[in-house]
Structures are given as C-alpha cells and as structure tokens.
Image (spheres, rainbow, N blue to C red):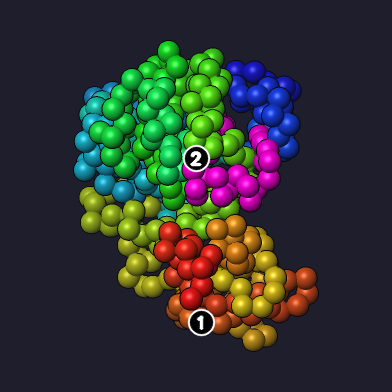
C-alpha cells in the first residue's frame, strides 16, 4: 500500500484521480475524490448510463476455519446460515447493548471461508472486534492492504463490464458474486452497490486495480461512463434512503431505530446484542429514522435540529438537494409518535424554522423521478 504520510492513505487510483483533475479531500483517513466534473453531472450519469467509483478505501476482513459459519452467525444480526456459496448478505455487527459496531456485507465462499466488506473508517475497529469474538478454530485476516475495489454502477453497467470480463454476467444475480478475470486480473465480481442502480463491485489485487479502471473507462466511453466521486455517491445513496455509518448508524443507535430491523433476526438462537434488541422490540423504541422532503425553501443538513412547533424532537442525519428529483430531501431521527408519513415538522435552517413533510423512503424510484421531470 502507498502511504503519503502517517495520517493520509492513498488508494491505488490516486494518480488517476489527479490526472483527471478531481477535487480531493481527506475522508476516513484516505485522500479521496469528492468530484470530477461536478456532483450533479456525475449523479445523473449513474442514473442514466454508468459511473465508475474508487472504493478502495473500504475494508475487507476474511474469517476462515472449521467453525467459520458458527463465528459469523454469532457475530451478525442477519441469518448467515441461510447463505449459500456465492451469496452476499447485508448484515450488522452489534455491541451487547444493541448499538451498531458497523453495517457490513458478508460474502460466503464456503462453509469454512467468509469475507466481510466493512466501512473504511471502521476497518481497524471491526478487525479487532471480529478477532475478539470469533472463538477457537477460526482465523481472521485483514485483507484491506491486498484488495483494491472499484464499483461500476448504472443501467449500462452490465454491457460495459461484460466487454472486459470472462464471466457471463447475466448469470450473476443481485447479491451474488463469482470469481473471474477482468483486464487480465483475477477478481471477485459482486452484483451489489450503494446507488439503487444495477451494478457491480469488483475486488482485485491492489496493483491490478488501475488496469481495471483504465479498461472499464475505455470500454465504457461509447456508453457515456463517467468517473464518480464521494459527493455523488452520497446523493445517490441518500435518494435510496440507504444508511451511512456515522450519520444514520453509530454505537448509540440500534438497527431497530434505524429502520433496518428486517436485517435483524430475533428468532436466531444467538448473536451479540440479541437480548438488548429483543427487549427494545418488546418495550418499543423512543426514536425512529424517517425521510423528509422540504415544503419550504432550504436544504436540510446533518445535525440540523427538528422541531414540533417550539419543541425539539429530533435531528437531521443526512440531507441534500436531490439531483434526480429536483427537491430538497433528508433523513433524521424523530420521536416515534411523530414518525408517521405525512407528518409536518420544522427544520431549523440558518436560524429559521422551515416546514418539511415526512415521506416514504426510498425517495427515488424511476416512476417518481419521471413524474418529477414531467409533472402532469
């Protein structure tokens, strides 16, 4: 791994970003591109054609050994026993009190080999947590220095990637993966993503990642592919209502409060945090994540306060002006009794209370987007 200094890490594509005149920022200890041609331009490219993302800052942690299945089952909220080889599962690691260690993707290679894809800022924390809780006959390896990662997302992702890949991508279903070859590099090709569009996430050796990037940019040029930075990655995921660790998820928030209880299987025999979450499910939750759209003029941002008249009732966790919908949207936690769709609340924006309405999430679907562009 190339390291610029003790504080900032560089991905294997760092020079490519500089050559493309990307705006670079420090993110989770990494120097990352926040935008190339502009957030809106890049966002719409993903919705209409395809975008290429450097996500090499994400972490990869392998769990292997005779008891690997038992280990991941006991550590994760979802039911890992349902996974077959080549399947991917969204799941969470929780503390005993139900707070979230991280939300992760779990890859099953076999009954004795799994891999977690974890959030960049949490990689070291997750690695330590997993090592401490796997038990005997299980090995844990942090592979984050070995893998680079590229995501290709958008409705034209498959034909672009197919031109560079030796696998029949039509046989890889959503939340499945296969091992194959791209640009003469062995890679894990996963039909997953963080945008709400069809697409793939590619794990490849660190020193082969740049070759894959160049190959996909070349193959995708006639399809309108664009490089996409963290700015559009955030607006894309927010339109889908996908949680982001550090915003919607943290150690003081449970999956039940975050509205992702479908990934929490309380009928399992055991997982770390199950007792606390069962108790919370029985007693009821005091706060709940909701989606907002602004009625008044203003854009909600993280940490803005939410009021019911003069009473403080919550806080915004994420907000933006949606490029697909042309309206200001956001997510935030409010008191449970105020969380019904249609409820109007005020968000404090620049010392003024601006009215917003709670709406269904995801904010974006192709039908909703079409109606926004062509209102009747």
x 49%, y 48%: residue: 48
- Tell me the element at label 1: loop
Where residue 93 appears, x then y in whole percent? 41, 45
Q: For mark 2, does the 10 Å Cα neighbourhood hold few (<14), some (14 to 19), or many (20 or more) residues?
A: many
Q: Magenta stretch?
A: 32-57
Give the left or right position of residue 66, taking residue 340 as reference: left
Residue 13 location in percent, x, y? 61, 24
Q: Residue at x 58, y 53 (%)?
A: 235
Q: Is residue 238 above or below residue 129?
A: below
Residue drawn at point x = 56 percent, y = 82 percent = 344
Spatial separation of the CA atoms under disc 2 and disc 1: 36 Å
Identify whether 187 is placed above or below 305: above
**Element marked by disc 2:** loop
Q: Which residue is mark 1?
A: 343
Q: Quadrant of residue 315?
A: bottom right
Q: Residue furthest bottom?
A: 309
Say the numbered circle drawn on residue 50.
2
What is the number of callouts on the image? Answer: 2
The answer to which of marks 2 and 1 sits earlier in the sequence is 2
- The percent position of residue 229, horizontal first and vertical second, equals 62, 40
Image location of residue 66, percent across then percent down: 24, 24
Image quadrant containing the N terminus: top right
Mark 2 or mark 1, which is nearer to you?
A: 2
Residue 50 on the magenta segment? yes
The answer to whether residue 333 is visible is no
């Amino acid at each position: 791994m190339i390291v610029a200094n003790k504080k900032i890490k560089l991905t294997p594509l760092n020079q490519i970003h500089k050559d493309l005149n990307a705006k670079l920022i420090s993110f989770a200890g990494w120097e990352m591109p926040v935008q190339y041609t502009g957030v809106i331009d890049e966002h719409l490219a993903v919705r209409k054609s395809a975008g290429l993302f450097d996500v090499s800052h994400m972490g990869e942690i392998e769990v292997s050994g005779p008891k690997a299945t038992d280990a991941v089952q006991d550590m994760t909220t979802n039911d890992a026993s349902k996974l077959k080889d080549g399947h991917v599962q969204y799941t969470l690691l929780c503390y005993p009190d139900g707070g979230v260690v991280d939300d992760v993707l779990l890859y099953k290679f076999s009954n004795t080999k799994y891999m977690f894809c974890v959030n960049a800022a949490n990689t070291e924390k997750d690695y330590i947590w997993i090592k401490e809780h796997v038990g005997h006959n299980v090995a844990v390896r942090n592979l984050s220095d070995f893998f680079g990662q590229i995501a290709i997302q958008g409705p034209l992702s498959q034909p672009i990637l197919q031109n560079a890949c030796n696998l029949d991508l039509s046989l890889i279903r959503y939340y499945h993966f296969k091992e194959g070859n791209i640009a003469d590099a062995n890679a894990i090709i996963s039909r997953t993503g963080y945008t709400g569009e069809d697409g793939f996430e590619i794990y490849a050796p660190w020193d082969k990642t740049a070759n894959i990037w160049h190959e996909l940019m070349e193959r995708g040029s006639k399809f309108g592919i664009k490089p996409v930075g963290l700015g559009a990655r955030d607006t894309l995921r927010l339109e889908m209502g996908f949680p982001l660790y550090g915003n919607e998820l943290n150690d003081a928030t449970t999956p039940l409060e975050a509205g992702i209880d479908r990934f929490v299987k309380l009928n399992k025999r055991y997982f770390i945090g199950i007792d606390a979450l069962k108790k919370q499910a029985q007693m009821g939750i005091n706060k709940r994540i909701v989606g907002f759209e602004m009625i008044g003029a203003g854009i909600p941002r993280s940490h803005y306060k939410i009021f019911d008249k003069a009473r403080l009732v919550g806080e915004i966790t994420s907000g933006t002006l949606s490029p697909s919908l042309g309206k200001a949207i956001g997510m935030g936690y409010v008191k449970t009794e105020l969380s019904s769709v249609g409820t109007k609340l005020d968000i404090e924006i620049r010392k003024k209370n601006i009215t917003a309405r709670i709406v269904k999430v995801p904010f974006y679907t192709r039908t909703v987007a079409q109606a926004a562009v062509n209102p009747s």
